[in-house]
Image (spheres, rainbow, N blue to C red):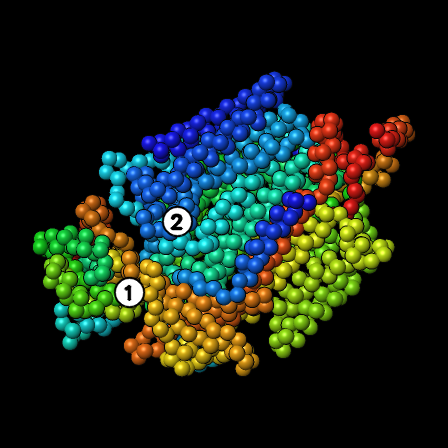
Amino acid sequence: MSRTITGTTRLSVLFVLLLTAVMLSPVQAAVDAFAFDTPEQQERFRHLSNEFRCPMCQNTNLTGSSGGVAEDLRREIYMMIMEGQTDEEITRFMLDRYGDFILYRPRLTGETILLWFGPLLFLLVGGWVVMGIIRRARPVERVAAELDTAEQERLRKLLEKVDEPH
Amino acid sequence: MSRLKLFVPVGVFLVLALLLWRGLYLDPRTLPSVLIDKPLPEFELPTVEMAAATVSKDDLPDEPFLLNIWGSYCLPCLQENPIFMAAAEQDLVPIVGVNYKDKPHLAQMWLEDNGSPFDYSIVDEDGRLGINLGVYGAPETFIVDGNGVIRYKHIGVIDYQIWETEIMPALAAVRAETAPL
Amino acid sequence: MVPELGHFALILSFCLCVILGTLPLIGASTGNRLWIGLARPLTAGVFVFLSLSLVVLGYSFVTDDFSVAFVAQHSNSLLPMQYKITAVWGGHEGSFLFWTWMLGGWMLAVALFSKAMPDDFVARVLGIMGIIGAGYTLFMIMTSNPFDRVLPLAPLDGVDLNSALQDFGFIIHPPSLYMGYVGFSVVFAFAIAALLSGRLDAAWARWSRPWANTAWAILTIGIALGSWWAYYELGWGGWWAWDPVENPPMINWLLGTALIHSLAVTEKRGVFKSWTVLLAIMAFAASLLGTFITRSGLLTSVHAFASDPTRGVYILGFLGFVVGGSLLLFALRAPLMKSEFGFAAVSREVFLLANNIILVVASAAILLGTLYPMIYQAVSGGELLSVGPPYFNTIFIPLMAILVVFLGMGSVSRWKKTSVAYLKKQLLWVAVGSVGLGVALPLAVTLEFSFGATIAVTLGMWIILGIVQDIRVKIANKPTVLAGLRSLAVSYLGMQIAHLGFAVILLGATLTSIYSSEKSVLLNAGESVDLGRYHFNFQGTEHLSGPNYEAERATFEVLKDGEYLEMLYPEKRLYTASMSPSTEMAIDSGFWRDLFITLGDQRESGAWSMTVYIKPFVRWVWLGAILMALGGLVAVTDKRYRRLKARALSGAKGDATDGPAQGRDKDYQPVSG
């Protein structure tokens, strides 16, 4: 059992590490201090900031980037929410200026149909494959019944040999 | 027939590999502008040269011009300054600057130290004009035609080669369209 | 002088890999016992020289040898010692050497722990890994040499390690991730060896399983550590970004999960052999694809190393050769599946197959989403598209939901044939209980109905109650519960622990997305903010000086339900050398929830901007992953893997049998695990 013990010990240490009570860590996220009137507005803000891509970063949403154009865009989103604009209008604003690149959720267009429906297609193909395998897989009893008497005799003898002690 | 089905994975893989090979020669980082052939956004902002007065779209040149996004903090902007200076001295094309997310007094000092190729520089301290232009960082340069429509965008520093092989031809094309008959 | 030794050792390991990749393989085909016997010693040699190479690189870092270009680019004389060592994998060249060394490590492990297998088979396995090793070492020698020198003018000091990497997470995440990632090359080599030798049977599956399970468990830990690191590094509570460099290990993990289950079916029932082989090839292909994406500049990612199309072409060529060649071999040599028989439409085999398919569909979907921006750019003539978390979550979550339903049914079902009536009897109360708890628990805790939370809890309980039910049935006729638990096979316990871990992740991931909350405020000293049941009292900041930074340290008194809980001290630092600011968030992590505070900036008024977060159940994501890995490792220790080794050592060499294992192996315990 020594392998289990080493494995378990290692994992227990990890366990404890991940449950470490308090720690300090460096972060890259932005901190704005926008005051909202309602929690729904705060949620909308967070949701929208997560849905838009930071144009100048490698691959982060607006929430995860401090400074630069990301900060400005979050400010715009905040102002638009406070002005009462809808999520669609805010999205339109971003699209008009930065194009589809800024949307982490690609719009459904002729060019993205394959993207959005591809997985469903894969699933259907997969399901078809499984059905095919099930249909062709025959339970042992039926296979045995399909053998003629000579083959059944051979089968019986073979099975006897298998069950002999070696 | 069943044996043929086993060739499906290798077939799919070949397609994938071709795709990946093609993809190696694409650049996923330069964001093309969606504002090509769209009019410049409206604005009413002061300039670095004259803080008291404001300029708007009407004040922009009536002929094709360059709109350059720059800042005193931006090192590549310093690198492309000589090119713009040479262009301004030879009167090749009007150049209007947008001082992006900068402090006007720092911008003034920068222009004094390095020379100004700009007819004037619009002050965009909070970056809102930049957002309306789809800017994400200095330097960026637009070619705008005489009607205030954006026709071309270059992201990043402009060196001599880019000036000759990309900017000048694009400018010539825009000029040819709006040339008097 | 010393770096040249490292370079030389690298070249030597390349040469040994070439020999290993040819002679033993030829020897296995022609029956040349001498050449077959070369496999293990050559493997040891490869490992020794790769180790030497790695140690030399580490030595160059530790001794601040900035004449080595890689060291100059990633280190600095003031860098703390632990980061000097880990800087070895802080950039492309060094991390690739580290990656290759991992391969050498796994090769050595195979050479040492393969006494139960026929020598010609082992020779093939090691030979194939030798070919892979040759490709990796050649790549380094030709395009990515970590030992390139900057001579004659070596810089006086280095550029320093990227500050984001000067962190504990960087010490543990890449090694564990690479170990798991590379580990799939072992079961890949087993699969190719089986195709080459024509020996594709249940014994092959039994040999492969410990290797597959171990690599899978380690990969689970590697990915989990990356997620944990990202969580506290990013600072807004995100722990998985579906980034193009994160996705390949996930694809590898999904295919690996399918593989370990498919291996179980092949071992126990002798069916799905070709499918298992195909999965082994695909899992390793995902690993190579990850290497390609990370190092070729194909896709924009926060993780990507500097891009270089030359390297990309090389890796792609290697990928094409290895994966294309394997798939071609598969097409030519794999047994046709028309001989699959022996199971009914409702049976354990079918449930496992269904979930296999779902895992592969999920992998294909993630690959599609990852590569689509590139495809779109190529096809649209330069326009860019982004595919991010909203897409991946929309696709992935429903697939996983279907998987969970089948998991619950599959793990109680029997091999060959399970009557629907039997399933109903076993699972009816499980289903009712799950739905009941799904509705009741969120309501009881939050006093609010949430559709998402109900579905999540129902699915999680479906798995957990299913585990309870199955164990109950198994220990029903034992005197005490304890005796019953002790009677269960180790591999069965491993399975249940792993499935429990999966349920824990599911619950953690979904519930934290639904119930997390945050609030951003501007506070002066003495003011406070409330979030949920917590009250955060901002007591001001004080200045303090660190070893290489100046900081403002904020003091927060945290109350829960009005009662004192603890103090938290987030900081805002300015690193004096680089004059770069950094925010240190203060996290209070707990089993049920995480609390954290991120400090922003101080305004002219003296007030500070800050955000407080409550993230319930987020720790469950990583604790669940640990449980899964633990389950996988426990299953490997099942005595039937070790008993056979002992038997083999005592004389009955080789287990080259045909046909299913059961009935022939006296030690075999027909447990339904």
Q: Quadrant of the N terminus of chain C?
A: top left
Task: Residue C238 in the image: state x and y as whole percent.
Answer: 49, 62
Question: As drawn, is A132 to the left or to the right of C544?
Answer: right
Q: Callout 1: helix, strand or loop?
A: helix
Q: Callout 2: helix, strand or loop?
A: helix
Q: Is residue B172 above or below residue C569?
A: above
Task: Residue C395 in the image: state x and y as whole percent.
Answer: 56, 56
Disc ID at residue C81: 2
Distance of mark 1 from mark 2, alpha carbons? 44 Å
Task: Residue C623 in the image: state x and y as whole percent.
Answer: 59, 58
Q: Is residue A101 above or below residue C563?
A: above
Residue under circle 1? B130
Does residue C517 appear in this view? Answer: yes
Q: Amino acid at mark 2?
A: Met
Please, which chain is the residue tagged with disc 2 on?
C
C532 and C422: which is toward the camera: C532
